[in-house]
Image: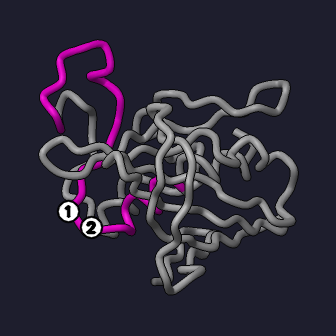
């Protein structure tokens, strides 16, 4: 699988699934099985991103290795993961990274315009072109009427690995590259 997202190229790094021990987003120690992807881009960007489904059933994407990429990408290594949730089908939240003065990144809510500005590309259009069945607010997609109802996300069919991978690159990697 090769995907081009503006200045980024994403390709499968290994043909065999990887096994790893680690900690899920919820903090449970677990073993996970998944895939590794190479992300290449401007300024010497070369990252390995892993997409893991843990034995607990949780799934997330994170930077696994920074390689020779600029130091500012350290903020993504095993941090600021993108969790793939199950709300009657796969769903990811589209929160993007902003770098603080100390160089550490944090996740922030964003609407479609803010996502596009941080990524340098129309995130909604890209996700739809890769098979997202819907992109919008939690309120519109999930019927959420709580405090996070205006948080943006994307729904996609089971088995579609392109949408979460692109969402990770566009909401985590691109904003750090662009120093948002």
Q: Nearer the viewer, residue 116 or 159?
A: 159
From the viewer's perspective, is the residue at label 2 or at label 1 nearer? 1
In the image: residue 147, left or right of residue 157: right
Element at label 2 = loop
Q: Residue furthest top?
A: 147
Q: Pick the quarter of the image with the N terminus.
A: bottom left
Label 2 CA crowd tier, 10 Å (few <14, some 14–19, many 20+):
some
In the image: residue 123, left or right of residue 175: left
Q: Provide residue 41's location: percent of width, then percent of height.
A: 71, 69
Q: Which residue is mark 1?
A: 157
Q: Quadrant of residue 107?
A: top right
- Tell me the magenta residue range: 141-168
Q: Nearer the viewer, residue 70 or 62?
A: 62
7 above or below 65?
A: below
Q: Which mark is on residue 6?
A: none
In the image: residue 91, left or right of residue 4: left
For the point 47% across and 47% down, the residue is: 30
Element at label 1 = loop
Q: Is residue 161 magenta?
A: yes
Q: Which residue is mark 2?
A: 131
In the image: residue 173, left or right of residue 123: right
For the point 71% across and 46% down, the residue is: 176
Q: Quadrant of residue 63?
A: bottom right
């Amino acid at each position: 699988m090769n995907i081009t997202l503006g200045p980024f190229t994403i390709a499968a790094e290994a043909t065999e699934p990887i096994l790893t021990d680690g900690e899920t987003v919820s903090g449970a120690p677990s073993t996970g099985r998944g895939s590794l992807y190479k992300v290449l881009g401007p300024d010497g960007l070369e990252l390995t991103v892993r997409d893991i489904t843990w034995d607990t059933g949780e799934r997330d994407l994170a930077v696994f290795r920074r390689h020779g990429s600029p130091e500012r990408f350290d903020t993504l290594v095993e941090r600021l993961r993108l969790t793939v949730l199950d709300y009657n089908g796969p769903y990811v939240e589209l929160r993007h990274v902003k770098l603080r003065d100390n160089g550490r990144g944090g996740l922030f809510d964003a609407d479609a315009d803010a996502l596009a500005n941080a990524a340098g590309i129309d995130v909604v259009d890209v996700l739809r072109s890769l098979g997202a069945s819907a992109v919008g607010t939690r309120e519109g997609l999930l019927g959420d009427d709580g405090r996070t109802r205006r948080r943006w996300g994307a729904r996609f069919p089971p088995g579609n690995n392109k949408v979460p991978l692109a969402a990770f690159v566009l909401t985590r990697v691109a904003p750090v590259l662009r120093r948002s």
